[in-house]
Image (cartoon, coloured by chain):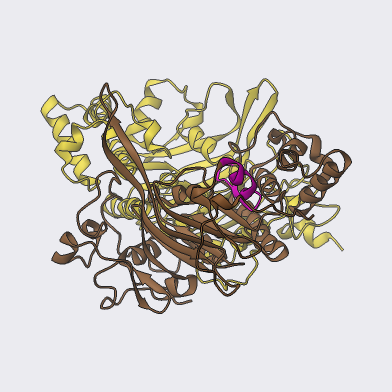
Amino acid sequence: MTTTPTSPSDTAVASVESGSGQSPLLEVRNLKMHFPIRKGFLKRVVGHVKAVDDVTFSVERGTVFGLVGESGCGKSTTGRCVIRLLKATAGEIVYTMPDDEPVHIEALDPESLRIMRRHIQIVFQDPYASLNPRLTLKQIVGEPLVINNVSQGQDLQDRVAELLRRVGLSPEHMNRYPHAFSGGQRQRISLARALALNPRFIVADEPVSALDVSVQAQILNLIKDLREEFGLTYLFIAHNMSVIKHICDSVAVMYVGQIVEMTTTRQLFRKPLHPYTEALLEAIPVPDPRRDRHRIVLEGDVPNPADPPSGCYFHPRCAYAQDVCRTETPPLAEHTPGHLARCHFAAELELKGMTI
Amino acid sequence: MADRAETILEVRNLHTHFHTESGVVRALEGVDFTLNRGQVLGVVGESGCGKSVTAQCIMNMVPSRGRIVDGSVIYHQRNGQGTDAVEITALPPKSREMRRIRGNEIAMIFQEPMTSLDPLYTVGNQLLEAINLHQDVDRTEARALAVHSLDRVQLPEPERVFASYPHQLSGGQRQRVMIAIALSCNPTLLIADEPTTALDVTTQAQILSLMRDLQDETHMSIIFITHDLGVVAEMCDEVAVMYLGKVVEQTDIDTTFYSPRHPYTQALLRSIPRLDDDQDRRLEVIAGSVPDPSSIPSGCRFHPRCPDFMTGVCEHREPTLIQIDEDHQVRCHLYGETASSQP
């Protein structure tokens, strides 16, 4: 399956210092997504929910980059801004085309955006809500091919069959409707649809959270296989640390709209630098009854992103907080090469990681 | 934890069917387990295995389309000297006796703290309702009990929470309120149906730790229904694994994780991503997916997905629950006479 993409119009392409052929596939710089809070008869804007607040990261080619955090931390909003399902308030999203030309996704006009979407696809969490119950598999998986005038007739039929086979479904089921399939099978359908246009980059927003354990493993393996086979790059959004550990090469931990720590998966689990990461690791229920059941539990709740605490957003729940944390916002600083943390005491604290 | 092994609840050969427009759904087709006083029993399984229906049967609150067609639930109630065996499944669901048992003896908490609290009433109102219904106390005493129960679940400022509406609380706080309501009448058995599934990890850790503390303090027995094997390992003393309406294995927590015998339990444990995994390890998968409850496989229900499937046996004969050790039951032909008589 070869789709030769047409370059988005030049107007949308801003110049980015071109790397030596190995620039990251995607760079997100200072991304902000602020949702207005409206109140009263005139629906005046009385404040903003800073769902994503100054997020910067880059995804290298062929890798899986994880975004992890609890509900409301802004991980899904970030994912949606990246593929422009939401128009970011501010910031840059730079995608490198196959010919190494950088494209600013946030500035694309509708026509260029449509072309861009051949390269970037998304898989959603809930396979029950993301598939149209009135369409057959052939229509669902074939739709992107039809819309983009890639294929029709017998060729379309053949391509859909091949895609279904690739994700482990039987092509004979092409004329069935989604209701005939289980959750795991539906997630396979979503993956087939995402792969239809031969994308290079997939945003996977909690793709296994709604699935049963035994099926979750099948889908995780499939995601890994597809990466090898099609040279895919993923932005993998999840709240489950064990899943992140299993699939991601590097990870960013988010808390109340900000990245609080970012490094390789291995480093993050071995030697976390941010107290929130430590708490997240500590909170995971471990399937081993011989492990000590009593441990430190993080107190309190995630703050309201419309009214975050002063200073470091994590200070009211942090066991190591000091006066400076209440007043000064720590920057996301590089502490060891490739390991960033947003904590005043990242260099001094000896946090507990996992022996892996 | 229990002084000695004294049974509090027995579920025997429970069969519950639902009569729907598209036919009979056999939700439970043989659920057996025993719970000892002061213990925490985990009931584990994937969606559709009948975990929640089992809980409804124990509470005698099966939805109207459902009927318990066979089997029994026996609750051993403490009186002055010994215990009385009450057959819950024989009581009419709306009888005075059953209503006394619910709440006073057996209480339940649900998965969705958002939907199980009434948004129109304050937390205090909902707590007082439970207390006034089950305990003979006057207004001031009832209020004091209510505030005390909020304090017991470690809610900060219990007086303020008492006057709050559910929407003013976070998910974790709501689940604490649910626990406070369930425990307000000091039940001896608590059924927790996926109590932490809708919560974030750090909040889940808080609720689990709270439940452990309360269990240590009151020595109540808990049936903990979950699909998360990590949560089971942290909370339970005993585990019953369910697959498609049947208990396929019951044993103590250590055996469940370190020497499970049923192929389904073994496969389930191998398929979870673990933190201490090598990243390059492929997760082992259970082939296929859980069958639809309206088209259940013949013989052993797990046979189409089973790695140890024995042709000629498993697809024809339903295995029975076999006692393979003092505290270990398995429903599998591998451990029955059928297996040894095979060539």
Rendered location of residue A289, percent (x, y)? 46, 65
Chain drawn in yellow: B
Q: Is residue B96 above or below residue A219?
A: above
- Which is nearer the eye, A268 or B63? A268
Rendered location of residue B28, percent (x, y)? 61, 36
The single residue placed furthest to the left in the displayed view is B140
Does residue B316 appear in this view? Answer: no
Rendered location of residue B19, percent (x, y)? 64, 23
Q: Is residue B254 above or below residue B95?
A: below
- Which is nearer the eye, A65 or B221? A65
Residue at the spot 58% in from the left edge and 43% down from the top edge: B47
Looking at the rendering, the stretch of residues picked out in magenta corresponds to A110-126
Chain drawn in brown: A
Residue B185 image-quadrant placement: top left
Residue B257 lies left or right of residue B118; in this view the side is right
Residue A124 image-quadrant placement: top right
Rendered location of residue B291, percent (x, y)? 70, 42
Residue at the spot 50% in from the left edge and 59% down from the top edge: B252
Residue at the spot 29% in from the left edge and 58% down from the top edge: A298
Residue A275 image-quadrant placement: bottom left
- Which is nearer the eye, A14 or B278? A14
- Would residue A124 be counted in the magenta stretch? yes
- Would residue A198 be counted in the magenta stretch? no
